[in-house]
């Protein structure tokens, strides 16, 4: 099994507090991997370290070299909503050399509209970025992340800010895009039903790694109790069938979209 | 040395034609050579300030330009103490301060405005400390407090440097406008998507520093930030897209500069040119607020 991303003894300390302690994990190439853990477990910190936005000790090795094509969908985009930037501007500004004050290049406009249409967001093309709802913005961010045909797609809580059906639709869309483009997907989430239905690899993190491997083998009561705390163990539930919700059509997705 | 006389003559002829065509006697002031020099200096400075101002507003860096302009005190003080050309020491110190703020801001866990505030305090305190020791310096420092619209136009070396900066800045805006917009939207997202954020941030800081120092010479320390942000803020109210924001800023910057210069030269006004230019831009801004309110009547 080839490895797309290897976290080798990654430790992050901020203000004297150890956020991550010797995290060692491997994300298989072409997999759909979830990083799960409770609040404050260091999930987003690990993603930021992967993106080069967080100082860390240890190594992060990527299969695609020093400067791989990454796509990143943040949990919340901290931006100035008063900025007069349209969705088309946003889609084009990372790809078009000609300054936007000379207009959009036809080729770039067509590419952007086609990609937005692929994620059912082409009706947003002329809207201002600051006027989008949470779910609409999530789609545009996904389109932004996909337009460079990423080798690794990184999503931080992709279902946050969207309702259950919206989250499920987003996951199904991601599944089909992954089949088309063949990228490796790394997703941070709290949503265990999403993990069970739409991922095939799982890393359980709470400052350190408590378990990793194929999703269905890793989501055991013991590992979840160790990762999330005692309440999972007390509940005495079989996982994933009972802990996870039923809104995703597990196990059909798992069978269809497994990449190993 | 390049002889700029033909350029000044062209300006004189153009305004003579406009005055005759429109029967507007207010334009007669442009026949004086010093007005032509002032106009040339402003025609170079205003679009640079407006274009850079778009990113100052996007990056929320108004305080940065304030700190750079206030480093003028310390720059002048150092120049006079070391018996060097004060223009040179102002530029050198401002560049050091601008790049240091960018570097510390990128590395420190402190918020950007806190980092800028520390540098701001340091340069102002240093400048005042030196000035208080050397009373003879006070007059030279005052010159930069209020600026002189003719500083650049009178000195052909300075106007050539300004023209060079104009070309460099134009090249940077052509190459980097889109990527700078991305960085302004969200630097983490831009970096993740292979935008060379660090390169753009440092280059932008260096160019903004140089524009701010030219603006100090022209309109004075107090009005540098206004020259940068008022056209850009107006453009934000009027524009509907990222490209439109740029053009609106240029239009507001240029029209404010020319109108302000002409008004300041009228007998009935007789005001400081820098301040008049900024006031015209503020009128533009007030108008843009009305337009914005009419577009979104429900927004409070």
Image: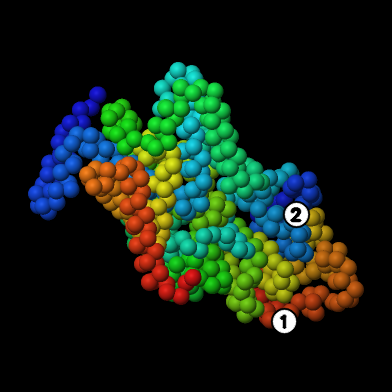
Q: What subunit carries mark 1?
A: A
In the image, residue B112 sits, relative to residue B168, either above or below, namely: below
- Which x, y percent locates residue A80? 52, 60
**Residue drawn where x is 39% and y is 46% of the image:** B227
Which callout, 2 or 1, points at the residue further toward the start of the chain? 2
- Left or right: residue B235 versus residue A27 is left
In the image, residue B225 sits, relative to residue A221, either above or below, namely: above
Q: Does the rendering let one see residue A234?
A: yes
Disc 2, SS: strand
Q: What subunit carries mark 2?
A: A
- Which x, y percent locates residue B260? 29, 47
**Residue B298, numbered circle:** none
Comparing labels 2 and 1, the label whose residue is closer to the camera: 1
| Residue at image mark 2 | A25
- Left or right: residue B297 versus residue A24 is left
**Residue drawn where x is 62% and y is 71% of the image:** A161
Residue furthest top as drawn: B83
Q: Quadrant of residue A202?
A: bottom right
| Residue at image mark 1 | A246
Disc 1, SS: loop
- Left or right: residue A7 versus residue A229 is left
Crowd class of label 1 (few under 14; some 14 to 19; many from 20; radius 10 Å): few
- Which x, y percent locates residue B179? 46, 51
Q: In which quarter of the image is residue A246?
A: bottom right
């Amino acid at each position: 099994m080839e490895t797309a991303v290897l976290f080798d003894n990654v430790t992050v300390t901020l203000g004297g507090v150890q956020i991550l302690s010797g995290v060692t994990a491997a994300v298989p190439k072409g997999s759909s991997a979830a990083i799960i853990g409770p609040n404050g477990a260091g999930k987003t910190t690990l993603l930021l370290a992967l993106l080069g936005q967080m100082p860390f000790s240890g190594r992060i090795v990527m299969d695609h070299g020093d400067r791989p094509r990454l796509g990143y969908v943040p949990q919340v985009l901290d931006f100035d909503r008063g900025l007069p930037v349209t969705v088309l501007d946003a889609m084009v500004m990372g790809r078009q050399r000609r300054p936007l004050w000379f207009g959009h290049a036809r080729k770039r406009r067509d590419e952007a509209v086609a990609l937005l249409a692929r994620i059912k967001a082409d009706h947003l093309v002329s809207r201002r970025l600051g006027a989008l709802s949470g779910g609409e913005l999530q789609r545009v961010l996904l389109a932004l992340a996909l337009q460079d045909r990423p080798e690794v797609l990184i999503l931080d809580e992709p279902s946050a800010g969207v309702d259950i059906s919206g989250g499920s639709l987003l996951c199904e869309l991601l599944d089909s895009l992954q089949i088309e483009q063949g990228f490796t997907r790394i997703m941070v989430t709290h949503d265990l039903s999403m993990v069970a239905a739409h991922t095939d690899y799982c890393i359980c993190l709470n400052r350190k790694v408590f378990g990793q491997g194929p999703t269905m083998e890793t989501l055991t009561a013991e590992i979840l109790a160790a990762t999330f705390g005692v309440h999972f163990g007390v509940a005495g539930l079989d996982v994933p069938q009972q802990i996870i919700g039923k809104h995703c059509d597990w196990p059909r997705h798992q069978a269809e979209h497994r990449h190993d | 040395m390049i002889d700029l006389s033909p350029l000044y003559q062209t300006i004189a002829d153009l305004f003579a034609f406009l005055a005759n065509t429109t029967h507007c006697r207010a334009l007669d002031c442009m026949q004086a050579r010093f007005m032509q020099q002032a106009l040339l200096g402003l025609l170079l400075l205003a679009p640079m300030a407006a274009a850079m101002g778009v990113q100052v507003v996007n990056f929320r860096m108004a305080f940065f330009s304030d700190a750079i302009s206030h480093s003028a005190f310390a720059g002048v003080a150092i120049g006079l103490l070391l018996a060097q050309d004060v223009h040179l020491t102002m530029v050198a110190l401002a560049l050091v301060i601008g790049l240091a703020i960018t570097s510390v801001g990128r590395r420190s866990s402190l918020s950007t405005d806190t980092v800028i505030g520390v540098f701001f305090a340091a340069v102002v305190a240093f400048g005042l400390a030196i000035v208080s020791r050397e009373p003879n310096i006070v007059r030279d420092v005052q010159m930069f407090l209020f600026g002189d619209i003719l500083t650049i136009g009178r000195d052909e070396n300075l106007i050539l440097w300004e023209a060079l900066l104009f070309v460099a800045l134009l090249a940077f805006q052509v190459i980097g406008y889109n990527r700078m917009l991305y960085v302004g939207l969200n630097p983490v997202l831009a970096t993740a998507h292979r935008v060379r954020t660090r390169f753009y941030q440092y280059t932008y800081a260096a160019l903004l520093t140089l524009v701010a120092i030219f603006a100090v010479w022209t309109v004075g320390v107090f009005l540098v930030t206004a020259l940068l942000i008022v056209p850009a803020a107006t453009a934000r109210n009027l524009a509907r897209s990222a490209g439109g924001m740029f053009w609106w800023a240029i239009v507001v910057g240029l029209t404010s500069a020319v109108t302000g210069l002409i008004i300041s030269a009228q007998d009935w006004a007789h005001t400081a040119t820098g301040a008049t230019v900024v006031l015209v831009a503020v009128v533009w801004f007030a108008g843009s607020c009305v337009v914005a309110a009419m577009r979104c009547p429900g927004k409070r």
